Image: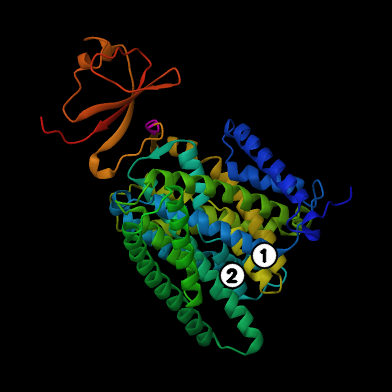
């Protein structure tokens, strides 16, 4: 079969749009079918990319620079969306645990895994045999827990974890990509710097520490400034179209990311901090619409990035890396991740031994490590193609072993319960200070005292604002007759009677 080679001819063409539409449709249909068997959607997106790639149907895509650019753009959207969803109420009780896991935990994981690669697995990797920095580079690339994978499994399967583990894992997984990226960049710069000068061991340590401090300090400073500036602008600017607020919010995230990069800081860290500030802005206009916009575009970015990375991979070149990838993956899952988790969570007695075991198992890899693996390729580092293949295989193993077993492991440890059904408000939006909006399905017990709104005798502070029946939306009144199965949108707030 002749390769189609569409990407190598012209990036924007009617053929590309046709192909993209077919792949997106196929990915959505496959994910729907895979959900019945407990397979993570993102794993299926990745496998679809492999299926239609150069070793499959023959679509050739080998431009690593374009892949890194598109992937980085997609990751900014995904990370920004995660930051918007992190509420202060959820984060406050588990803030210390989450931050420790996403910083110290990532560093410990990199050190333990890097030493293992250098002492044992590295001898099977061409170009890495005697390079401790090369070993730490691989470890840094796979050191983060992928937020996309965690969100898609926990929220997609409607799993809620006891001991406040769900928000802790979401905070960790959505905030540790910047740390992993910083460590990856440091290792890449140390390796490329060796070509220009003979840098001693202490020189490498001080250089790495300097880069780390600069990235973090500038990233945090720009993120905090961007967050406060964004909240001020959103309180002052009045736009004629509600949809424009979503675009305005997105531009603020891009601004923080770009400014931090120009100042040699970490753009992903700045972007995430800015998003958290905006997401916790109580007077954010059209807040529900903004979240829906970012949910949709984040899913599109996830789908696009996993498909693209699947297209980029060539299974025929990975056969020689299966052994070391398996060794590293098993060490990471069963030793490095648990060790880093138990050390970080040791001071927190409210997290049980079973809770720490589950957190250890939720070390899911995803698009982040594969995207970070493009950094050494773009930088022209020796053995970078082998590193990419190893990281790709580790990600596949993680999604297969950890992703598909997370729900049964959580149930086995008795640490999960089903989430409450998602509130259906039929597009209605209510400012937070006015109260909570909930939906309720009318039952026979509700109608025991009478079948009208007035005869339901609702408690003080609860009002029915909308009734949905047979696809129609009805405005309620006291004498309105209700039936079993009617959907009621109710407001729970303060009352003066």
Q: Is residue 145 left or right of residue 192?
A: left
Where residue 225 sits, quadrant-wise, is: bottom left
Prevailing secondary structure of the magenta residues: loop
Mark 1: few/some/many CA within 10 Å (<14, 14-19, 20+): many
Residue 110 screen position, x and y as percent: 51, 66
Residue sitting at x 62%, y 55%: 394
Is residue 424 highlighted in magenta? yes
Which of these two is toward me, 270 or 124?
A: 270
Q: Is residue 200 left or right of residue 430?
A: right
Q: Is residue 386 above or below residue 238?
A: below
- Secondary-structure class at tag 2: helix
Q: Is residue 37 above or below residue 398?
A: above
- Secondary-structure class at tag 1: helix
Which of these two is toward me, 148 or 466?
A: 466
Residue 148 screen position, x and y as percent: 52, 50
Is residue 42 highlighted in magenta? no
Residue sitting at x 15%, y 33%: 495
Spatial CA span between label 1 and label 2: 9 Å
Question: Mark number for residue 137?
Answer: 2
Q: Which residues are magenta?
A: 419-425
Instruction: Give yes or no for contact between labels 1 and 2 (Cβ–Cβ under 8 Å).
Output: yes
Which of marks 2 and 1 precedes in the sequence?
Answer: 2
Question: Mark number for residue 387?
Answer: 1
Mark 2: few/some/many CA within 10 Å (<14, 14-19, 20+): many
Q: Is residue 436 left or right of residue 428?
A: left
- If the image is split into quadrants, where does the C terminus sit? top left
Which of these two is toward me, 372 or 448?
A: 448
Residue sitting at x 47%, y 72%: 259
Q: Is residue 221 left or right of residue 122?
A: left
């Amino acid at each position: 079969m002749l390769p189609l080679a569409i990407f190598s001819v012209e990036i924007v063409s009617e053929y590309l749009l046709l192909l993209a539409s077919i792949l997106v449709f196929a990915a959505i249909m496959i994910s729907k079918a895979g959900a019945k068997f407990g397979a993570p959607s993102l794993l299926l997106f990745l496998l679809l990319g492999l299926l239609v790639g150069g070793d499959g149907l023959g679509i050739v895509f080998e431009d690593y620079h374009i892949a890194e650019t598109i992937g980085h753009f997609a990751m900014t959207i995904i990370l920004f969306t995660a930051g918007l969803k992190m509420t202060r109420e959820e984060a406050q009780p588990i803030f210390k645990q989450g931050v420790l896991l996403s910083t110290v935990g990532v560093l410990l994981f990199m050190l333990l895994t890097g030493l293992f690669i250098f002492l044992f697995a590295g001898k099977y990797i061409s170009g890495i045999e005697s390079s401790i920095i090369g070993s730490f580079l691989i470890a840094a690339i796979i050191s983060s827990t992928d937020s996309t994978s965690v969100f898609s499994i926990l929220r997609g399967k409607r799993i809620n974890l006891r001991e406040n583990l769900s928000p802790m894992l979401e905070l960790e997984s959505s905030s540790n990509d910047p740390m992993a990226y910083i460590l990856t960049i440091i290792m890449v710069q140390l390796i490329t710097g060796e070509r220009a000068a003979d840098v001693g061991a202490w020189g490498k340590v001080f250089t790495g520490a300097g880069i780390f401090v600069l990235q973090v300090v500038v990233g945090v400073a720009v993120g905090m400034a961007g967050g406060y500036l964004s909240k001020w602008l959103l309180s002052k600017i009045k736009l004629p179209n509600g949809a424009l607020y979503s675009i305005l919010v997105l531009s603020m995230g891009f601004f923080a990311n770009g400014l931090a990069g120009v100042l040699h800081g970490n753009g992903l860290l700045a972007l995430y901090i800015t998003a958290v500030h905006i997401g916790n802005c109580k007077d954010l206009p059209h807040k529900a619409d903004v979240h829906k916009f970012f949910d949709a575009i984040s899913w599109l970015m996830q789908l696009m990035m996993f498909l693209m990375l699947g297209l980029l991979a060539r299974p025929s070149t990975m056969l020689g890396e299966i052994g070391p990838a398996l060794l590293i993956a098993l060490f990471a899952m069963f030793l490095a991740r648990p060790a880093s988790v138990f050390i970080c969570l040791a001071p927190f007695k409210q997290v049980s031994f079973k809770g720490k075991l589950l957190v250890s198992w939720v070390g899911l890899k995803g698009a982040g490590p594969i995207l970070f693996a493009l950094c050494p390729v773009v930088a022209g580092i020796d053995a970078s193609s082998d590193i990419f293949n190893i990281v790709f295989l580790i990600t596949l193993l993680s999604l297969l072993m950890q992703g598909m077993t997370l729900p049964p492991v959580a149930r086995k440890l008795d640490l999960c319960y089903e989430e409450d059904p998602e509130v259906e408000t039929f597009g209605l939006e209510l400012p937070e200070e006015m109260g909570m909006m909930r939906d309720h399905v009318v039952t026979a017990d509700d109608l025991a005292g009478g079948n009208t709104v007035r005869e339901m005798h609702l408690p003080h502070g609860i009002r029915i604002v909308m009734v949905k029946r047979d696809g129609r939306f009805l405005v309620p009144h006291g004498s309105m007759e209700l039936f079993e199965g009617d959907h009621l949108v109710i407001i729970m707030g303060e009352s003066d009677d």
